[in-house]
Structure formats: C-alpha cells, structure tokens
Image (tube, rainbow, N blue to C red):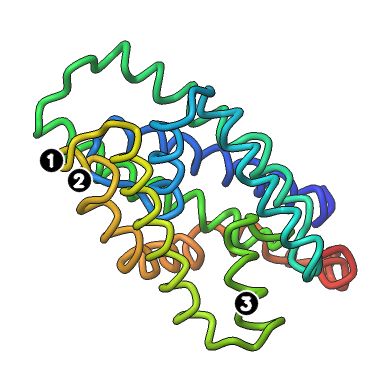
Amino acid sequence: MSIRVKRILMTLFGVIICAISVGIFKIAALGVDPFQSFMAGLDALVPIKFGTLYVIANAVLLLFALVFDRHYIGIATFINLFLLGYITQFTYEFLQTLLPDPSMAVRILCLVIGVVIICFGSAFYMTADLGVSTYDAVALIISKTWKKGKFQYVRIVTDLVCVILGAGLFLLSGGKVSSIPTIVGVGTIITAFFMGPLIEFFNVRVARPILAEKKDGSASGETSSEK
C-alpha cells in the first residue's frame, strides 16, 4: 500500500472516530469542544439537521481559507467537511435510542469515552497530514499568514469567540441559562486545555508507527513527495 493511500485511509478513520466522539459528547451533555459549542448553539437556533448545518458552516470557513490562504486546505479538509457532521448526527440519534435519559454516572462515562476516542481519532487525522479542518485554518491564517500573533494565543481567542457565540446563540434560541453547561461545560475545558498529551500519546504509540516506513526501506522517499 502506498504512503498516499495509507494517509487517506488514516484521515478517513480519524474523521469517523472524531465524529463518533462528538456524538458521544452530545449525549454526555457536559460540554463539547469550543467549535462544537458554537455549532451546538447554531443547531439550537437554526431549524436544519445538524449534518447539513455543519456542512454549511464549514463551507463558509472554507471560503475564507480559499480567499486568504489555500495552503492549509487539503483532501482531509473536505473529508472533515462532508463527513463529520452527518456521522455525528447519526451517532447522536442512535445513542439517544439506547440512552434516552442517561444518569449522571452514564453521562460522565460518556464524557470520558468521548475524550479518549476524540484524541485517538485526532492522532490519526493529524499524523496523516493531508490538510486541516476549516476551523483550524482560520487560526493558522490569522497567526501565520496575517502575522497577528502566535498561533496558541490566536487559537485561544478563536476558541473563546466560539464558546461565547455558542452560548449566545443557545440563549437566543430560547435555551435556559441553567442548560448552558450542556454545551459549554467541563467537557469544553478538558478539550480546550488537556487533550494535547493524550493525542501525543496516541501519536507516538499508534498513529506514527502505522505510517512509519517499512524496514526494507521500500517506502523511502514516498512520504515527502506524496504528502
């Protein structure tokens, strides 16, 4: 199998796993990652299925990236754009039939499972290195193309904007203040600040070894030319 095909398969696998994890986060209702907080608020306000809404929102961000710096856009960007929302929607609806009224213990368990598998999926997606998500591209363009600050600080700002917008849209849709922690809660804090070490663990132990060159060196030189 060529390195290019392996990277594409790793991207597909990573996106699917990440999408499933978002569905699990939604069942946990203890907060999702910053961008999904925005999407949750938007989903509460706009009467469109989540999968379609996700494509529309990311298409707008994709247009931004294509206009200002298309360097960050790759096949992984489009896989993420067209698959993640629909798989998340399917996972969430399926889990709702299994867990119509989950207890707090089950919700906490779902949160833990969601964190672990989103890090696992992210390791494959990131190691494949075939482009970033449209949301990631925004912070990269602001920091590296426009030179408006270091990436880590720009990303904190974009994450905060997403969280604030998500909460605002949720309230605008008629949601209660007491229900805000279901989309902006402990899960949001965990994904925003503590995912890095776990993603790196899966990078080192699983994703990178899968992509590593064969011992006989037959894959030598293919990685750089087909990235």
Indicate the secondary structure of the residue bearing disc 3. Answer: helix
The structure residue drawn at horizontal position 76% and vertical position 54%, both measured from the top left corner, is 63
Q: Earlier along the polypeptide chain: callout 3 or callout 2?
A: 3
Compared to 121, does 219 lie above or below?
below
Mark 3, residue position: 142
Separation of marks 3 and 2 at Cα, in angstroms: 29 Å
Disc number placed over residue 178 in the picture, else none? 1
Place of residue 13 in the rendered image (x, y in percent of width and height, measured from the top left): 60, 41
Place of residue 208 in the rendered image (x, y in percent of width and height, measured from the top left): 59, 64
Separation of marks 1 and 2 at Cα, in angstroms: 7 Å
Q: Residue furthest top?
A: 97
Amino acid marked by disc 2: Pro
Disc number placed over residue 181 in the picture, else none? 2
The structure residue drawn at horizontal position 45% and vertical position 39%, both measured from the top left corner, is 42
The structure residue drawn at horizontal position 44% and vertical position 68%, both measured from the top left corner, is 200
Place of residue 4 in the rendered image (x, y in percent of width and height, measured from the top left): 82, 54
Confirm or deny contact between disc 1 and disc 2 (CB under 8 A): yes
- Is 54 or 99 nearer to us in this picture? 54
Separation of marks 1 and 3 at Cα, in angstroms: 34 Å
Q: Earlier along the polypeptide chain: callout 1 or callout 3?
A: 3
Compared to 48, does 144 lie above or below?
below
